[in-house]
Image (tube, coloured by chain):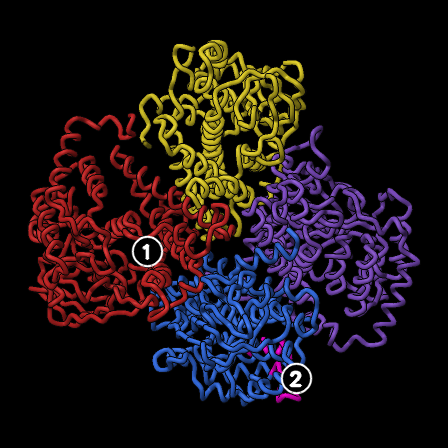
Chain colours: A yellow, B blue, C purple, D red
Amino acid sequence: MFTLSEEHEMLRESARAFVQEKMPTAHLRAVREAKPEGFDRALWAEMAQLGWTGILIPEEHGGSALGYVGMGLVLEECGRTLAPSPLHSTALVGASAIALGGTAAQKNEWLPKIAAGELIVALAIDESAHHAPEKIKLEVKNGQLTGMKKYVADGHVADLLIVAAREGGVVKHFLVPANADGVTITQLKTLDSRGAADIAFKGAKAEPLGGPELVDQVLDRARIGLAAEMLGQASQAFETTSEYLKTRTQFGQLIGSFQALQHRAAKMFVELELTRSCVLAALSALDENRNDIAELASLAKARAGETLHLVSNEMVQMHGGIGMTDAADPGLYLKRARVAEALYGSASYHRDRYAALNNF
Amino acid sequence: MFTLSEEHEMLRESARAFVQEKMPTAHLRAVREAKPEGFDRALWAEMAQLGWTGILIPEEHGGSALGYVGMGLVLEECGRTLAPSPLHSTALVGASAIALGGTAAQKNEWLPKIAAGELIVALAIDESAHHAPEKIKLEVKNGQLTGMKKYVADGHVADLLIVAAREGGVVKHFLVPANADGVTITQLKTLDSRGAADIAFKGAKAEPLGGPELVDQVLDRARIGLAAEMLGQASQAFETTSEYLKTRTQFGQLIGSFQALQHRAAKMFVELELTRSCVLAALSALDENRNDIAELASLAKARAGETLHLVSNEMVQMHGGIGMTDAADPGLYLKRARVAEALYGSASYHRDRYAALNNF
Amino acid sequence: MADGRGPETSQELEAFRNETRAWLEANCPPLMRTPMGEDDAVWGGRNWKPKHPEQKQWLDAMASRGWTAPTWPKAYGGGGLTPQENLILQDELRRIKARPALMSFGIWMFGPVLLEFGNEEQKKKYLPQIVRGEIRWCQGYSEPGAGSDLAGLQTKCEDKGDHYLINGQKVWTSYANEADWIFCLVRTDTTVKHEGISFILFDMTSPGVETRPIKLISGASPFCETFFTDVKVPKENLVGKLNGGWEIAKRLLMYERTSISAGGFGGGAGALPIEEIAKHYVGVEDGKLEDRDLRARIAAHKMYDKAFGLTVRRAQEMAKAGDNVSHMASMFKVAAATMNQEKTELIVEAMGNRALGWSGEGFTKGEILAPRAMLRAKGNSIEGGTTEVNLNVLAKRVLGLRDHQ
Amino acid sequence: MADGRGPETSQELEAFRNETRAWLEANCPPLMRTPMGEDDAVWGGRNWKPKHPEQKQWLDAMASRGWTAPTWPKAYGGGGLTPQENLILQDELRRIKARPALMSFGIWMFGPVLLEFGNEEQKKKYLPQIVRGEIRWCQGYSEPGAGSDLAGLQTKCEDKGDHYLINGQKVWTSYANEADWIFCLVRTDTTVKHEGISFILFDMTSPGVETRPIKLISGASPFCETFFTDVKVPKENLVGKLNGGWEIAKRLLMYERTSISAGGFGGGAGALPIEEIAKHYVGVEDGKLEDRDLRARIAAHKMYDKAFGLTVRRAQEMAKAGDNVSHMASMFKVAAATMNQEKTELIVEAMGNRALGWSGEGFTKGEILAPRAMLRAKGNSIEGGTTEVNLNVLAKRVLGLRDHQ
């Protein structure tokens, strides 16, 4: 379950090399200043050329079918430098939703475009301030969508929207081109500089995608993939902080030689190792199509959220004053952390879900 | 609100002198071995002679009317050495219930006996494993009680029981002599060696005490008084541990010179100071009959519970192996802590109540 | 003791209360009784331009009685009030929800140490200006290599016979770019550590002073880097003894911690209670917040907050009764930082995706401010002495634990 | 990779599984497949009296295949299994819910270091007895003044020419009063610290050995104080080099931490899941535990528990793949202790006043055990290396942070 194949090791190495070279945190700063879309289309094209957009797409549709473990490794590496791109929305959420739930025609139409990096997809789920898929109100009548979606990740740059909506009382997914009539997209300037969108639908034409069971399947994939990205963020935040502890001096001593900081660092290390196991287990559960995916998805998302929350806070604190400056990296990790913690359900949401899944 | 009068300072000094001399933790050990009742009647008589049983009783009924702040100071000192006695049940809960809710006849009958140390009182509230006064089922019909009460503190040695029961849908208090027909008392051997009782009522004759408003009034007094005792326990557990940190050597250093332990000790100090403020505020709110008694009672009980939980755990951990032995004191504090945490509502119960009192 | 205030609640104090109430009624302009907005705080100083004439009117009225610094001696422009009278004044100000007439590092930090360590001439010169809000002060303490280890500071101050010459760099100088004068720690002896520090004052318009704002992760820039190049300072600007600055520095830090903790870290007037925010964004079921996990954590936080408030009040009463409560400064600093961080995080969590905006369309003003307040609050456990340093202080000075021998 | 086990799931391993399953089916007595009670654990040794004949039958059967120590070489009585085969054996044992045939410090701690550091004669002499459960071992490590600082031990071992003479005192010797032999750290050079320690073995029936049980706060007495007065030990009982015991001691501690963490701290077979206990004592409303605050904390704990289990499994897979996972021992020790303390506290909290009994009437057996388990669990962060020491180890050896210079 936890041992990587040689193919996966190679994928990780190449992802790390690309991200470290082309998308260090300086890249996020550049995007923040100069790219209102929240990412760089030239680099996005390079990601597609590396095959990342096709990792979850069958070979017959132009992908490599390297599976969720492979996708997770790439997202983790992107997380390390906070590399901004619509990879999660498109290559993980969009591709898996269509591959799992699409008709032959839908697959033929969309998957090759996703694999080629020609199409950006976004999943529109939440309708209030909080993740609550069980309370979706947005309605489809006579094939037309009406209602409001909030904080759609990458919704401001999407070409195709996957929209969860209620039809005849049952929640299902629907496909809506972003430029369709009756779709109004309000771009949000967000804490993590990636952007998002509030989207209003007023009689927009919607095409069904899969059955009711697809909703949770797609959400759990979104959660697990985001947890992998968060694991990368937390790992890097921790490593950067550890290095700082080994170089910054106060009172004539490296601050990393103070036992109180040593113990806090050691505890973070334990949290990170535990979180890594949860994320890897959840990713391989997807590849093995096991029956504990829901439980592992909540586990991975909640633990990644809590670990990232802790580590991002400690990153600022252990950097001291410098950690509070916009010029240093801790703030960037902290901001992305809070966004990722909230998306697809907070730790609190997933504790509740985990308890419900365990019947208590 | 927080400044003690000279009278109160003197009361505290004399309580401390008595408890430290006559009831150090060695006394609890002796009681544990040799006194199945869980306390020493000779010392109880001395406490009464010192006037402690009359602190909440008006002078006309043989008391000193030194108020709740005075009662709290004595309970705090008793908490320091885990001094076992029915002081809380009798002198605080019993005396205040009758003084607040009793008829002239009831006061005349019972208060002088309490003041004289001739009567032990116990409050019978809980009916299940958890504190839940709002769910009381025990019923009074035609002046007769039927039902079951669980873990009545000092119920095994009480002469008089105050029993919360439902009559015509409304919960009120009733007085029942412990030796009345239809009362069956099962003594429990408890973690803290003080004992308690499960009590069954089968048609026992019951005499009303006060109206429905008395139930919460008495419970809040019980909570605040217990919080004062817990503050004493936590304070002493902390001080004993601090001293140990200053004498135990490992790795050629006093263990109190290790920064990780220093920070944990400092955090305990902060918690204790905050808890002390809550307890003192709650006690003086009772004396001033303020309108925020309920809120302060839940605050004091919850914070005392959390602080004592933390400090009792750290007391064992910081004493290392020796802290795990029955021959050392940490275990005694830990055991009494868990009992006190649960009585009259856990921290979890009081967080819920605090939220409800604040309308959220 | 029925009102819990103790036996000193004499007739004289009641008279003082009545008189104060009447005076405030007559002198506090109605606008100054409304909640403050983001940039309504009055810091005074040479370059201050009041947003509203009422701000100046209110400041002048309070300053005329010395009530911007109520307990300072009248001889230096203060109010000359006893601690009891000051409590009444503060009560009455709260009662009418009056805005602070003046925010001032001079009043909170510099004034108290000058009263203790300054000479008569210095007190006469600087304190009245502070009371009247004429001169705005900033604090030259931290340096890039001297944060928690403040005594490691390197800014050099040389004795040039008829003046001192200062060269070096400070960082985290709050509002240095808007301040008129600075109280500054400098190194006057490089051969020793703590015993080589002096406490000195100078005008920020002196040649050779340069300030550069630091942008924070919250987007704001309340702090500066401050550079000193051959700044000439008159010799009478030294406070206390040459090389005796560390004592003054420590005392000032205590005042700083106390003022930070007592004032809280923002989220001041006008901010809604967390539970009201949560009710709005999370929803309510059977009268309880729908997210019960969050509800329990909000309750725990509010209880901690209440315990903190009660403890501040206890310390005030103890101080009034003559007890030494200086050991509590570090405790308040630690607890206040924890609390403000907890609070701002809970608000962000309660607001969900509505607290993930940075600017622009789609979010209310409050929604934009929430994450910035959370980000800003991270500094609370760093500025004015880190939580780590304060825990060290508590362990050593209060609990008596020793360092490795 | 469909079953997640990796490419080594070859036909040979399948064959091994089938054969193992059949053998267990034939050789594990039905009684040995039922949950264990409090005192059903089998520790073997000279003085062991089986409670049931099936216990002896099961032990002998397993020992005959060397499966009480499955991965030890066959030459020393072990099973000679590869790590993969052992995983299968453990799988199959779990499948039929078999009780452990033998609990043994010899197998968990002493045997592994003897395999590495012992000479051929010692291995031949001691290991087969351990496999068969004939000799029960105890561990002579801690001393009253040497707990976390184990290397501060003072028990003296003098070279008397044809034998060693041991004088001193050990503490926290698990089951010393029931053990046959002891592996013991002694001081053979008083002029240096770590380099003056040796690792030695002797019979607990030797003249001059005395044990005294220590009563714990939980009421049980699994540990002893152990006194050595002029105990004569043959010179061939030294393991490794004279004054070379600290290396062995550290390696053994690693095995101890791993075995403690992997085995968990009790709450073993037969214990109900926390949420079932909570449902019984707290009640259920709309399918959810009525105390929602407790419910959230139980969920958080179960998630941590699950994460821990997954991490143990990950470490096993990594070890199987040849990765060095020795750095994880301290992590598992810290996490396992935290987890067991959390779990036993949550159970006590969920049981409310029903978990406040010590003995006697009015409580069920489970209700009496719950607080004792909670009390016993406090030792988990002390025994086998305190949490503090393990955090130091993680900080220094894994994260590379240094001590003050």
Q: Are discs 2 and 1 located on one and the same chain?
A: no
Residue occupying the point 13% across, 41% down: D25
**Image spot of residue A92 (x, y percent):** 47, 23
What is the chain letter for disc 1? Answer: D
Q: Residues within 10 Å of mark 1 (few under 14, many from 20)?
A: many
Q: Which residue is mark 2?
A: B104
Badge 2: few (under 14), some or many (20 or more) residues near its Cα, within 10 Å? few
Question: Compared with residue C138, is residue A1 higher up or lower down, i.e. above or below?
Answer: above
Image x and y of residue D109, in percent: 21, 52
Instruction: Name the amino acid, label 2.
Output: Ala
Q: Secondary structure at mark 1?
A: loop
Image-quadrant location for residue A207: top right
The quadrant where residue A36 appears: top right
In this view, the residue farthest toward the right is C26
Mark 2 vs mark 1: in front: 2
Which residue is pictured at 45% across the width and 59% down the height?
B261
Q: Are marks 2 and 1 in contact (CB under 8 Å)?
A: no
Q: Chain of mark 2?
A: B
Q: Percent from the top left, x then y, of residue B293?
A: 65, 66
Question: Residue A111, image x and y in percent?
Answer: 47, 13
Three-letter residue code for mark 1: Gly
Is residue D349 rendered to the left or right of residue C242?
A: left
Can residue A101 be seen here? The reply is yes
Mark 2 to mark 1: distance in Å?
64 Å
Q: Residue at (40%, 56%) from the top-left corner? A: D347
Image mark for residue D385: 1
Quadrant in which the C terminus of chain C is drawn: bottom left
Question: Residue at the location (60% across, 22% down)?
Answer: A140
Report the span colored magenta.
B55-74
Q: Is residue C109 magenta?
A: no
Relative horizontal placement of residue C34, taking residue D367 as reference (left or right): right
Which sits in the foreground, C249 or C193? C249
